[in-house]
Amino acid sequence: MIFYRPRFVIAGTGSGVGKTTCTLGLMAAFRKRGLSVQGFKAGPDYIDPSYHTAVTGRPSRNLDTWMCQPERMKEIFLRGSDGADLSIIEGVMGLYDGKSPLSDQGSTAEIAILLNSPIILVVNIQSMARSAAAIVKGYQSLNPNVQIAGVIVNRAGSEGHVRLVQAAIEQECGVPVLGWLGRESDIDIPERHLGLVPAIERGELDPLFEKLAALMEERVDLARLFSIAQAAPVLSEPMDRLFVPKEKTKEPVVLAVARDAAFNFYYPENLELLEHAGAKLQFFSPLSGESVPEEADGLLIGGGFPEEFARQLTAQEEVKQSIARRIREGLPTFAECGGYMYLCRELIDRHGQAYPMVGVIPATVKMQNRLAALGYREVLAATDNILLRQGESARGHEFHYSTLTMENDDYPSAYQITGRRGVQKEGYAKGNLLAGYTHLYFPSNPAMVERWLNVCRTYRQQKGGYHA
């Protein structure tokens, strides 16, 4: 089977050159033209996909060749882009930046090559003219398999400046300059942080998106850009698939999923793999005073930013009591990052104010102004838990501004994690409770899904008795 997917990648020469600005502007401009646009983000980031989703009206998805195998990444792209007129993939960092300085592994370039996708390179041309051609030429030559199909220049001083750069790039590199942005001061994307997500969802950034769309209409050759996307080669069916049709032989599992402004980061594929394996997802909002549904056979509390809503979460006593009671009764529970923080004894905000949380994990969480952890993580299960057997591994990502202090020395860690700082202990695993800072990516080890749902089925049959 082959798939026709009009697409292009927005890549940059480095971070901060305007990839997100161009991506959002193009998404908004093509939406205004009546097209269905699907957004993707290279790498594990979940802030930029929130922007994409707000602009396109379709859930944006992550494409990552370190957290899962390339063929599975390809399947995620094909499933996510089904029914869209155009797919726009926003790159990460510079085009060739990834897991290693010696290869393209995990980079935007690798994703573009695997998806046989044309690349639109965003170049900051401030204080240069002909030198811009040398930059593009270098990006073309580093890997001949990379298809740079066009350039958008940013931080231009004037239209005259653009014409100088355009002449040099088109003569020396043989690719068109499709458009430009100047040094506008009113189109800056706000600094990315978790607390921004609710503002995006409330529509507070819609005027910015509209302004970006107008700029793209005025300064980018959208028709030519869409022609480049339409000319992208067809893609073949992946050889290794996650979502293989299968007969439903087991009774569905009811999985309660916390989802509201405080807990809203979930990789779409994680939830879809759970549904594919037989889970019936039932969403509830702790922030709104909704307790864990009584019919739940399992509980998932994902990432987010409980620190932004600590006062409201603390005030919901019945919700906290329902979660604590169900976990102590043995409800198979997985909590990650924001969910992990929520299950601790208390959360101390940046001003030193302490807020009691659910209290099933004997630890205190303290917010700080600087980033506490960021980067890919490979986890190795320290003991058997609801997702992994001891010694089994999975991959994910960690990003948070808090630190966690354990109240005693026999704190049962969930994993050994491998990252830039070497090997460390992470998370909490006891009975049917598993929690940690690492956002696990289920496509990295799909067996986690079946193991968890089987534990949920056993719980429903036996109503086990775990005590935190």
Image (spheres, helix red, strand yellow):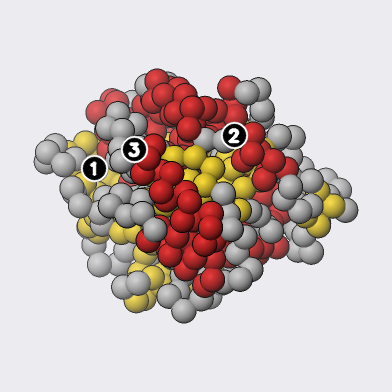
Left or right of 393 on screen, residue 273: right
Who's the residue at 77% across and 59% down the image? 238
Q: Residue 222's mark?
A: 2
Answer yes or no: is residue 452 visible: no
Residue type at mark 1 is: Leu
Who's the residue at 24% across and 43% down the image? 346
- Name above or below for residue 97 compared with residue 210: below
Secondary structure of the residue carrying numbered label 1: strand
Q: Of label 1 and label 2, which has the lower sequence position?
A: 2
Answer yes or no: is residue 110 visible: yes
Tag in front: 1 or 2 = 2
Report how far apart the C-alphas of labels 1 and 2 lie in the structure: 48 Å
Secondary structure of the residue carrying numbered label 2: helix
Residue type at mark 3 is: Ser
Instruction: Report crowding for label 2: few under 14, some 14 to 19, many 20 or more residues within 10 A (C-alpha).
Output: some
Q: Which residue is mark 1?
A: 347
Q: Of label 2 and label 3, which has the lower sequence position?
A: 3
Q: Which residue is mark 3?
A: 158
Secondary structure of the residue carrying numbered label 3: loop
